[in-house]
Image: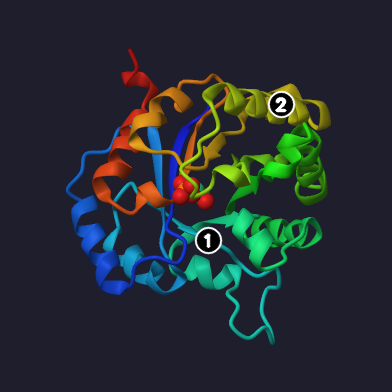
Amino acid sequence: MRKQIVAANWKMNYDLAETEMFLVELKKQVFPENVRVMLGPSFTNLNHAFKSLRDHPVELVAQNMHQSEEGAFTGEISAKMLKSVGANIVILGHSERRTYFNEDNAILAEKVNTGLENEMTIIFCVGEELQEREKGKQFEFVKTQLSEGLFHISDDAWKQIIIAYEPVWAIGTGKTATSEEVQEMHEFIRKTIAESYSPKIAENVSILYGGSVKPDNAKKIFKQPDVDGGLIGGASLKVKSFMDIVNACDKSQSE
Ligand code: PGA
Protein backbone atom coordinates (compact mmCIF):
# COMPACT_ATOMS: atom_id res chain seq x y z
CA MET A 1 0.00 0.00 0.00
CA ARG A 2 1.26 3.44 -0.88
CA LYS A 3 1.75 5.77 2.04
CA GLN A 4 -0.33 8.96 2.11
CA ILE A 5 1.83 12.07 2.47
CA VAL A 6 1.18 15.73 3.25
CA ALA A 7 4.21 18.01 2.91
CA ALA A 8 4.30 21.70 3.82
CA ASN A 9 6.34 23.90 1.50
CA TRP A 10 6.81 27.14 3.38
CA LYS A 11 8.77 28.81 0.57
CA MET A 12 10.36 32.10 1.73
CA ASN A 13 8.09 32.56 4.76
CA TYR A 14 8.65 32.67 8.52
CA ASP A 15 11.70 33.73 10.47
CA LEU A 16 13.00 31.92 13.55
CA ALA A 17 10.44 33.30 16.01
CA GLU A 18 7.53 32.60 13.65
CA THR A 19 8.84 29.10 12.99
CA GLU A 20 9.07 28.47 16.74
CA MET A 21 5.50 29.69 17.28
CA PHE A 22 4.24 27.31 14.61
CA LEU A 23 6.21 24.38 16.05
CA VAL A 24 4.89 24.91 19.57
CA GLU A 25 1.35 24.75 18.22
CA LEU A 26 2.10 21.87 15.85
CA LYS A 27 3.44 19.70 18.65
CA LYS A 28 0.12 19.94 20.49
CA GLN A 29 -1.67 18.25 17.59
CA VAL A 30 -2.62 14.61 17.22
CA PHE A 31 -1.37 13.11 13.98
CA PRO A 32 -3.11 10.34 12.04
CA GLU A 33 -0.99 7.20 11.89
CA ASN A 34 -1.61 6.60 8.21
CA VAL A 35 -0.26 9.90 6.94
CA ARG A 36 3.41 10.83 6.64
CA VAL A 37 3.62 14.52 7.53
CA MET A 38 6.52 16.69 6.37
CA LEU A 39 7.50 20.28 7.08
CA GLY A 40 9.67 22.40 4.78
CA PRO A 41 10.83 25.58 6.55
CA SER A 42 13.58 27.85 5.21
CA PHE A 43 17.18 26.62 5.28
CA THR A 44 17.97 28.93 8.21
CA ASN A 45 15.27 27.35 10.38
CA LEU A 46 15.94 23.69 9.60
CA ASN A 47 18.35 23.21 12.47
CA HIS A 48 15.97 24.73 14.99
CA ALA A 49 13.05 22.67 13.66
CA PHE A 50 15.23 19.54 13.76
CA LYS A 51 15.96 20.03 17.45
CA SER A 52 12.39 20.96 18.23
CA LEU A 53 10.94 17.94 16.37
CA ARG A 54 13.31 15.33 17.80
CA ASP A 55 11.29 12.15 18.54
CA HIS A 56 8.30 13.69 16.76
CA PRO A 57 6.71 11.97 13.72
CA VAL A 58 6.81 15.11 11.54
CA GLU A 59 9.72 14.85 9.10
CA LEU A 60 11.85 17.71 7.83
CA VAL A 61 12.07 18.68 4.17
CA ALA A 62 14.50 21.04 2.46
CA GLN A 63 13.10 23.18 -0.34
CA ASN A 64 16.11 22.89 -2.63
CA MET A 65 19.74 21.77 -2.77
CA HIS A 66 22.80 22.29 -4.97
CA GLN A 67 23.88 19.52 -7.31
CA SER A 68 27.55 19.55 -6.24
CA GLU A 69 28.82 17.82 -3.14
CA GLU A 70 30.81 20.90 -2.03
CA GLY A 71 32.92 23.73 -3.39
CA ALA A 72 32.99 27.31 -4.57
CA PHE A 73 29.26 27.96 -5.00
CA THR A 74 28.60 31.06 -2.93
CA GLY A 75 25.21 31.03 -1.27
CA GLU A 76 24.41 27.41 -2.04
CA ILE A 77 23.54 24.48 0.24
CA SER A 78 24.74 20.88 -0.13
CA ALA A 79 23.08 17.55 0.55
CA LYS A 80 25.55 16.87 3.36
CA MET A 81 24.65 20.17 5.05
CA LEU A 82 20.95 19.36 4.85
CA LYS A 83 21.39 15.90 6.26
CA SER A 84 23.48 17.26 9.13
CA VAL A 85 20.46 19.29 10.27
CA GLY A 86 17.99 16.44 9.93
CA ALA A 87 16.58 17.12 6.47
CA ASN A 88 16.72 13.77 4.70
CA ILE A 89 14.07 14.79 2.20
CA VAL A 90 14.45 17.45 -0.49
CA ILE A 91 12.04 19.10 -2.93
CA LEU A 92 13.58 19.27 -6.42
CA GLY A 93 12.19 20.90 -9.55
CA HIS A 94 9.61 23.12 -7.93
CA SER A 95 8.18 25.40 -10.62
CA GLU A 96 9.43 28.51 -8.78
CA ARG A 97 12.97 27.11 -9.00
CA ARG A 98 12.46 26.26 -12.67
CA THR A 99 11.01 29.69 -13.49
CA TYR A 100 12.92 32.18 -11.32
CA PHE A 101 16.24 30.36 -10.97
CA ASN A 102 16.50 28.78 -14.42
CA GLU A 103 16.64 25.19 -13.21
CA ASP A 104 16.17 23.07 -16.29
CA ASN A 105 15.70 19.34 -16.66
CA ALA A 106 19.45 18.75 -17.11
CA ILE A 107 20.35 20.52 -13.84
CA LEU A 108 17.52 18.69 -12.11
CA ALA A 109 18.82 15.34 -13.33
CA GLU A 110 22.16 16.19 -11.65
CA LYS A 111 20.40 17.24 -8.45
CA VAL A 112 18.45 13.99 -8.45
CA ASN A 113 21.72 12.03 -8.71
CA THR A 114 23.26 13.97 -5.84
CA GLY A 115 20.17 13.42 -3.69
CA LEU A 116 20.17 9.69 -4.42
CA GLU A 117 23.89 9.32 -3.77
CA ASN A 118 23.36 10.99 -0.40
CA GLU A 119 20.50 8.60 0.40
CA MET A 120 17.94 11.35 0.50
CA THR A 121 14.27 11.05 -0.39
CA ILE A 122 13.35 13.33 -3.29
CA ILE A 123 10.04 15.04 -3.89
CA PHE A 124 10.33 15.59 -7.65
CA CYS A 125 7.96 18.26 -8.95
CA VAL A 126 6.46 18.38 -12.42
CA GLY A 127 3.66 20.46 -13.90
CA GLU A 128 2.64 22.39 -16.99
CA GLU A 129 2.07 26.12 -17.44
CA LEU A 130 -1.30 27.47 -18.53
CA GLN A 131 -0.16 27.86 -22.14
CA GLU A 132 0.58 24.13 -22.46
CA ARG A 133 -2.76 23.18 -20.95
CA GLU A 134 -4.60 25.56 -23.26
CA LYS A 135 -2.90 23.90 -26.23
CA GLY A 136 -3.71 20.44 -24.85
CA LYS A 137 0.01 19.68 -24.50
CA GLN A 138 0.12 19.11 -20.74
CA PHE A 139 0.74 15.36 -20.92
CA GLU A 140 3.58 15.68 -23.40
CA PHE A 141 5.12 18.45 -21.29
CA VAL A 142 5.01 16.51 -18.03
CA LYS A 143 6.34 13.38 -19.77
CA THR A 144 9.37 15.36 -20.99
CA GLN A 145 10.02 16.72 -17.49
CA LEU A 146 9.94 13.16 -16.17
CA SER A 147 12.04 11.59 -18.87
CA GLU A 148 14.73 14.30 -18.93
CA GLY A 149 14.92 14.94 -15.18
CA LEU A 150 14.17 11.62 -13.55
CA PHE A 151 13.95 8.60 -15.82
CA HIS A 152 17.70 7.96 -15.86
CA ILE A 153 17.51 6.54 -12.31
CA SER A 154 17.72 2.82 -11.54
CA ASP A 155 14.73 0.65 -10.61
CA ASP A 156 16.05 0.47 -7.08
CA ALA A 157 16.24 4.27 -6.69
CA TRP A 158 12.46 4.59 -6.97
CA LYS A 159 12.25 3.71 -3.28
CA GLN A 160 13.64 7.22 -2.68
CA ILE A 161 11.24 9.06 -5.02
CA ILE A 162 7.97 10.86 -4.40
CA ILE A 163 6.38 12.73 -7.32
CA ALA A 164 4.48 16.00 -6.92
CA TYR A 165 2.24 17.14 -9.76
CA GLU A 166 1.81 20.90 -9.50
CA PRO A 167 0.19 22.64 -12.47
CA VAL A 168 1.91 26.04 -12.50
CA TRP A 169 -1.35 27.87 -13.17
CA ALA A 170 -2.78 26.54 -9.90
CA ILE A 171 0.13 27.46 -7.59
CA GLY A 172 -0.65 30.32 -5.23
CA THR A 173 -3.43 31.51 -7.53
CA GLY A 174 -6.43 30.13 -5.69
CA LYS A 175 -7.25 28.23 -8.91
CA THR A 176 -7.21 24.52 -8.18
CA ALA A 177 -7.29 21.93 -10.89
CA THR A 178 -10.56 20.00 -10.74
CA SER A 179 -10.35 16.62 -9.07
CA GLU A 180 -10.95 15.05 -12.52
CA GLU A 181 -8.03 16.99 -14.04
CA VAL A 182 -5.82 15.96 -11.13
CA GLN A 183 -6.78 12.29 -11.36
CA GLU A 184 -6.29 12.28 -15.14
CA MET A 185 -2.72 13.60 -14.83
CA HIS A 186 -1.81 11.38 -11.88
CA GLU A 187 -3.05 8.34 -13.77
CA PHE A 188 -1.01 9.44 -16.78
CA ILE A 189 2.13 9.85 -14.65
CA ARG A 190 1.65 6.40 -13.12
CA LYS A 191 1.11 4.87 -16.55
CA THR A 192 4.23 6.59 -17.89
CA ILE A 193 6.29 5.18 -15.01
CA ALA A 194 4.81 1.72 -15.59
CA GLU A 195 5.79 1.87 -19.28
CA SER A 196 9.30 3.20 -18.65
CA TYR A 197 10.01 0.99 -15.61
CA SER A 198 7.43 -1.52 -14.40
CA PRO A 199 3.82 -1.65 -13.18
CA LYS A 200 5.11 -2.63 -9.73
CA ILE A 201 7.32 0.46 -9.42
CA ALA A 202 4.47 2.65 -10.69
CA GLU A 203 2.06 1.15 -8.20
CA ASN A 204 4.38 1.84 -5.27
CA VAL A 205 5.32 5.46 -5.95
CA SER A 206 3.40 8.15 -4.08
CA ILE A 207 2.13 10.96 -6.32
CA LEU A 208 1.16 14.17 -4.52
CA TYR A 209 -0.90 17.03 -5.88
CA GLY A 210 0.04 20.66 -5.24
CA GLY A 211 -1.56 23.96 -6.22
CA SER A 212 -4.01 25.88 -4.04
CA VAL A 213 -4.94 22.90 -1.86
CA LYS A 214 -7.08 24.22 1.00
CA PRO A 215 -9.05 22.56 3.81
CA ASP A 216 -12.26 22.85 1.78
CA ASN A 217 -11.01 21.14 -1.39
CA ALA A 218 -8.44 18.71 0.05
CA LYS A 219 -10.76 15.79 0.71
CA LYS A 220 -12.18 15.73 -2.81
CA ILE A 221 -8.70 15.81 -4.36
CA PHE A 222 -7.20 13.24 -1.97
CA LYS A 223 -10.10 10.86 -2.63
CA GLN A 224 -8.95 10.31 -6.21
CA PRO A 225 -7.44 6.84 -6.64
CA ASP A 226 -4.06 8.01 -7.97
CA VAL A 227 -3.64 10.91 -5.54
CA ASP A 228 -1.53 9.99 -2.52
CA GLY A 229 -1.50 13.33 -0.72
CA GLY A 230 -0.41 16.90 -1.28
CA LEU A 231 2.38 19.46 -1.36
CA ILE A 232 0.93 22.48 0.37
CA GLY A 233 2.12 26.08 0.14
CA GLY A 234 -0.08 28.91 1.44
CA ALA A 235 -2.43 26.74 3.49
CA SER A 236 0.49 25.14 5.36
CA LEU A 237 1.40 28.40 7.07
CA LYS A 238 -1.32 28.10 9.72
CA VAL A 239 -1.41 25.05 11.98
CA LYS A 240 -5.21 24.79 11.83
CA SER A 241 -5.51 24.76 8.03
CA PHE A 242 -2.44 22.52 7.69
CA MET A 243 -3.88 19.99 10.16
CA ASP A 244 -7.26 20.08 8.43
CA ILE A 245 -5.49 19.10 5.22
CA VAL A 246 -3.43 16.40 7.00
CA ASN A 247 -6.62 14.91 8.45
CA ALA A 248 -8.38 15.10 5.08
CA CYS A 249 -5.60 12.90 3.72
CA ASP A 250 -6.26 10.10 6.20
CA LYS A 251 -8.08 7.70 3.88
CA SER A 252 -8.82 5.35 6.77
CA GLN A 253 -11.19 8.05 8.06
CA SER A 254 -13.03 8.55 4.77
CA GLU A 255 -16.70 7.76 4.69
P1 PGA B 1 0.13 26.72 -2.95
O1 PGA B 1 1.62 26.22 -3.29
O2 PGA B 1 -0.49 25.65 -2.10
O3 PGA B 1 0.30 28.03 -2.23
O4 PGA B 1 -0.58 26.88 -4.25
C1 PGA B 1 1.91 24.90 -3.56
C2 PGA B 1 3.38 24.74 -3.92
O5 PGA B 1 3.92 25.61 -4.62
O6 PGA B 1 4.04 23.76 -3.51
Q: Residue at x 39, y 65 (%)?
A: 13
Sequence-first disc among 2 and 1:
1
Q: Residue at x 57, y 70 (%)?
A: 80
Q: Could you say where residue 179 lies in the image, as x and y percent from the top left? A: 53, 24
Q: Nearer the viewer, residue 127 or 8?
A: 127
Q: Could you say where residue 222 lies in the image, as x and y percent from the top left? A: 46, 27
The three-letter code of the residue at mark 2 reads Phe
Q: Residue at x 52, y 61 (%)?
A: 63
**What residue did someone put label 1 on?**
63
Q: Nearer the viewer, residue 32 or 171?
A: 171
Q: Quadrant of the C terminus?
A: top left
Q: Is residue 45 left or right of residue 222?
A: left
Q: State which quadrant residue 12 falls in.
A: bottom left
Q: Is residue 34 visible?
A: no
Marking on residue 239? none
Q: CA distance from mark 2 to mark 1?
A: 26 Å
The three-letter code of the residue at mark 1 reads Gln
Q: Could you say where residue 216 lies in the image, as x and y percent from the top left? A: 34, 31
Q: State which quadrant residue 248 falls in.
A: top left
**What residue did someone put label 2 on?**
188
